[in-house]
Amino acid sequence: MKYWNPYTETLPPEQLDAIEFAYFKEYLAYAKTHSGMYREKLKDINVADIKTLEDVRKIPFTYKDDLRVQQEREPQNFPYGALLGVDIAEVSAFRQTSGTTGKPVYVPESYESWQWRVESWCHILWMAGFRPRHRVFLPVGYNVYVAFWECHYACEKVGCEVVPGGALDTIGRVNKIIEVKANAMGCTPTYGLNIAEEAMKMGIDPKTMGIERMICAGEPLPEATRKRLEELYGAKVYDHIGGTEICGWAAMCEEQKGLHIIEPFFLIEILDRETLSKEVAEGEIGVVVITPLGRHSFPMIRFNTNDMVVKGKGGCACGRTSRKIMEVVGRADDLRKIRGVLFSPKTVEQFIREEFPEVVEFEILVERKGIMDELTLRTELQPSVGKDKAEEIKARLKERAKVKTNLTMKVTLEPEGALPRYTLKAKRFKDLRGVK
Amino acid sequence: MEEIRKEIAAIEKSAKRLKELAADMPGIKTNADIILTFVFLLKFVTPVAESKRA
């Protein structure tokens, strides 16, 4: 079976529009009556006045900072406050955001809302070719973070066998993959690279570990990193994009050209960065605004993700009719002005993974020295790289960084194990300006 | 798709009746509730498609 849901995945886009709009109106009415946040936020919005998709733009955005404020209200619904959309007795699971950009947001899941989320994730896995014959190793302790819980439940639902790999170190995980003959894996791209690195240190070629398919979660996946993972494991590696507040909402199909929006689960708007008022044209970069259309425990209307993507063209060789995004450019939050130049850490990851297979880990620091911002690229090379070769790589890194970012970086070579290894979301970019 | 929708409606009716019959039996009532959760999902993934753009 090629499609998880052949009916919705092949509907004409105009019919998907109509379905999503109808779902949106129902969901808007629900949010207004069941969520403290939206009772207040939408008090001047009359659902009956929203007659077209264009009218949706009249509704205010929801920002992450709103959520932080609203969860402090309505103490009877602690810790979710005015974000809760069901009776608190219906909440069956607690999740939270990673807190990368500030105080974490606590997310309540009812059984129904969780299953809705899992169903959306089934599309992600099915598109990535996960099938009942797969034994999927999840090499992380899921903790309170949602992505691998979603992956776990969705793997079970599509019929895979899940091997949870928490409470092991990386060596233990390499051994477990081999011991149980896992043939698929779900992990952050960074940790996929770390497992491969650890396996090589153990004298094991990652290609011989038997992983044939991988779904990445938790971090952006630049194309060069995806290809590197494919080379290391000899596996097919797939990307998806999502967030704790709004679920996994787009994923790669077997064509591996962009990501399909999972329709009709979400109303997705890709808006111009300057005014956030117009849908961008195909091929242009826009900010993603999302309404997940069936999440009652945590209503979310027009959530401004701050994620910037390239809007894709309709149609795909896979036959799915859903809209696509061609590339995740990064988060608006990640862009920094350094010495007057707009800098994206993703650019550095992209060229390192593409051109420097010897670099096993890296970190970018920006500090203020006097009145100048100074960038340092700290790198850790494979232990087998000799001293002369290391110096040559260092010089080349400096040169390529300048070409790719228009910024001069100091490059350092760090001893083996000096840089942190991440199991979940990696923090390779550290802006220390203003930090004493 | 129409036949599928009819079957979903029948399951919903049946699960609601089950809930009524098992009002004092948490095990059975909870399982009926779980069936209704999946009825919600089944309805969500089998929407009636209209040909006109909203």
Image (tube, rainbow, N blue to C red):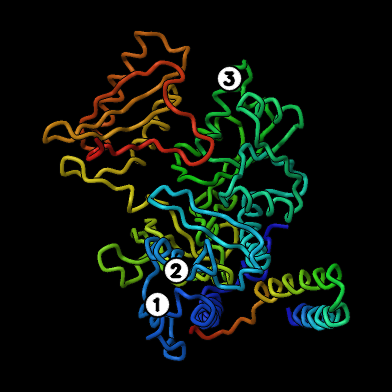
Residue B15, percent across and down?
Answer: 82, 78
Name the front one of labels 3 and 1. 1
Residue assigned mark 2: A73
Residue depicted at x 86% and y 70%: B28
**A160 displayed left or right of A366:** right
Q: What is the secondary structure assignment of the residue under circle 1?
A: helix
- What amino acid does circle 3 point to? Met
Of pointers 2 and 1, the one earlier in the residue sequence: 1
Residue A274 location, x and y as percent? 25, 64
Return the chain for callout 2.
Answer: A
Instruction: Name above or below for residue A370 compared with residue A222.
Output: above
Regarding residue A135, the answer to whether it shows in the image is: yes
Residue of label 3: A200
Residue at image location 26% in from the left, 38% down from the top: A435
- The residue positioned 60% from the left and 73% from the top of the image is A86
- Residue A362 in picture, x, y percent from top left: 39, 28
Q: Is residue A132 above or below residue A43?
A: above
User: Horizontal and vertical percent for residue A260?
Assistant: 53, 59
Residue that protrudes farthest toward the left in the picture? A371
Residue A180 is left or right of residue A113, and the answer is right
Q: Quadrant of residue A285?
A: bottom left
A56 displayed left or right of B9:
left
For disc 1, the chain is A
Q: Nearer the viewer, residue A125 or A300?
A: A300
Q: Which mark is residue A248?
A: none
